[in-house]
Image (cartoon, helix red, strand yellow):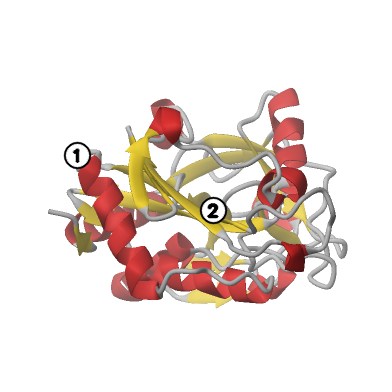
C-alpha cells in the first residue's frame, strides 16, 4: 500500500509521524473520511472544503492549497489501483515538543490512506441494526464544536464501547438536554407518516456529507423533509429508521433499546433511499483514472 505523506507517496512501512506530533500527544488535528465508487471519489470537493473549515476552526494552517489536497487525494487512490474503497485524510498539528502550546508546532503534517472499509457486517445492511441509547452524552457546542472533525474522538469511542458491551454495533447519543444528536459515527433519519425526520445540526450532530446527499435524494423522491429536535420517543414510534455516514453509507435500523421500530424489518421507503443513494454514489464523483 502506498501512503501519501507530506508530499510524497511512500510504502506503508515508511509512513510514520513523530511521537512528538500533537496529534499523538493531544489528539490535535482534523480528518476526513471519503468514499471511492467505480473509480470516482465521491463528493471529494465537499469533503476537502469541510477539512479546510475544520482546520480553520481550530487555527490549524494546512500547508497545501485546496487544489493540491484534491490532487494528492486522487493520486493516492490511483497509486493503490482502487476502483472502490475508502480514503482517510488526516492533518496533524505537527511536532512541537511535550508542551500544550500549539503555536510551538511550526508546520502541520498530512497523510492520506486509500484502502477499503466495511463498517458493519453485510447482514445488517440487509436485515437492519439494533441500536441502544448510551449514557455518554455529546459535548455542548461551547465545549467542543461538533462540526469540527477533530482527531479527538474519545467521546465517540466511549459511546462505541458502551454499544459493544451491550452487544450492539451502534448507539444513539443524546445531548445534555436529552435530544438526539447522532450515533457514535453516523447521522440518523426517521420516517413517520411518509415524512423524513432528522435532528437539527444545532442539537449536536455532524453536518454529514452523506446526510446532505439523503436530503437531496428526498427531494428527488418527493419525500417531505423536516429537520427538528427529536427524542428517543420519536424513534420508538417511527415507521422506519436508518443511519447515514461516509463509512456506513446507508444502513437500516430495526430497533432501539429492544423496542421494535415499525415491523422490525427495513422499510419500503428506507429501501428506496438506499437504492437512490447507491445510484447517486456509483454515477457521480471526481474521476481517478
Q: Which residue is at 39% across, 47% downward?
A: 87
The kind of secondary structure element at disc 2 is: loop
Q: Position of residue 122 (x, y in %)?
A: 39, 29
- Earlier-in-chain disc, 1 versus 2: 1
Visible residue check, residue 200: no
Quick check: marks 1 and 2 in contact, CB under 8 Å? no
Residue at image x 25%, y 61%?
280
At label 2, counting other C-alpha atoms closer than 10 Å, the crowd grade (few under 14, some 14-19, many 20 or more) is many
Establish if 101 lies above or below 79: below
Of residues 126 and 239, the one drawn nearer to the viewer in this rendering: 126
Image coordinates of residue 5 in percent, x first then y, are 43, 48
Which mark is on residue 241?
none
Q: Which residue is mark 2?
A: 239
The residue pinned by badge 1 equals: 81
87 vs 150, left or right, is: left
Q: Which residue appears at 32% of the width and 32% of the height?
A: 1
Label 1 and label 2: CA atoms lie apart by: 42 Å
Amino acid at each position: 500500500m502506498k501512503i501519501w505523506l507530506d508530499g510524497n507517496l511512500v510504502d506503508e512501512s515508511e509512513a510514520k509521524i513523530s511521537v512528538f506530533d500533537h496529534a499523538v500527544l493531544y489528539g490535535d488535528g482534523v480528518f476526513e473520511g471519503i468514499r471511492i465508487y467505480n473509480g470516482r471519489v465521491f463528493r471529494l470537493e465537499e469533503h476537502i472544503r469541510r477539512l479546510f473549515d475544520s482546520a480553520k476552526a481550530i487555527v490549524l494552517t494546512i500547508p497545501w492549497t485546496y487544489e493540491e489536497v484534491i490532487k494528492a487525494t486522487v493520486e493516492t487512490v490511483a497509486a493503490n489501483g482502487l476502483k472502490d474503497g475508502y480514503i482517510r485524510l488526516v492533518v496533524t498539528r505537527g511536532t512541537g515538543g511535550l508542551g500544550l502550546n500549539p503555536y510551538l508546532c511550526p508546520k502541520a503534517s498530512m497523510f492520506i490512506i486509500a484502502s477499503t472499509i466495511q463498517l458493519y457486517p453485510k447482514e445488517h445492511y440487509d436485515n437492519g441494526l439494533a441500536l441502544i441509547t448510551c449514557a455518554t452524552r455529546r459535548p455542548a457546542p461551547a465545549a467542543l464544536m461538533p462540526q469540527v472533525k477533530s482527531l479527538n474522538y474519545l467521546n465517540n469511542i466511549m459511546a462505541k464501547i458502551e454499544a459493544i458491551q451491550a452487544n450492539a454495533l451502534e448507539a444513539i447519543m443524546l445531548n445534555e438536554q436529552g435530544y438526539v444528536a447522532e450515533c457514535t459515527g453516523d447521522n440518523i433519519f426517521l420516517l413517520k407518516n411518509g415524512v423524513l425526520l432528522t435532528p437539527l445540526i444545532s442539537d449536536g450532530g455532524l453536518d454529514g456529507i452523506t446526510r446532505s446527499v439523503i436530503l437531496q435524494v428526498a427531494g428527488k423522491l418527493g419525500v417531505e423533509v423536516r429537520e427538528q429536535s427529536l427524542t428517543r420517543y420519536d424513534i420508538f414510534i417511527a415507521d422506519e429508521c436508518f443511519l447515514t455516514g461516509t463509512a456506513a453509507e446507508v444502513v437500516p435500523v430495526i430497533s432501539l433499546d429492544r423496542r421494535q421500530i415499525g415491523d422490525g424489518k427495513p422499510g419500503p421507503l428506507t429501501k428506496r433511499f438506499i437504492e437512490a443513494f447507491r445510484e447517486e454514489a456509483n454515477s457521480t464523483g471526481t474521476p481517478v483514472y
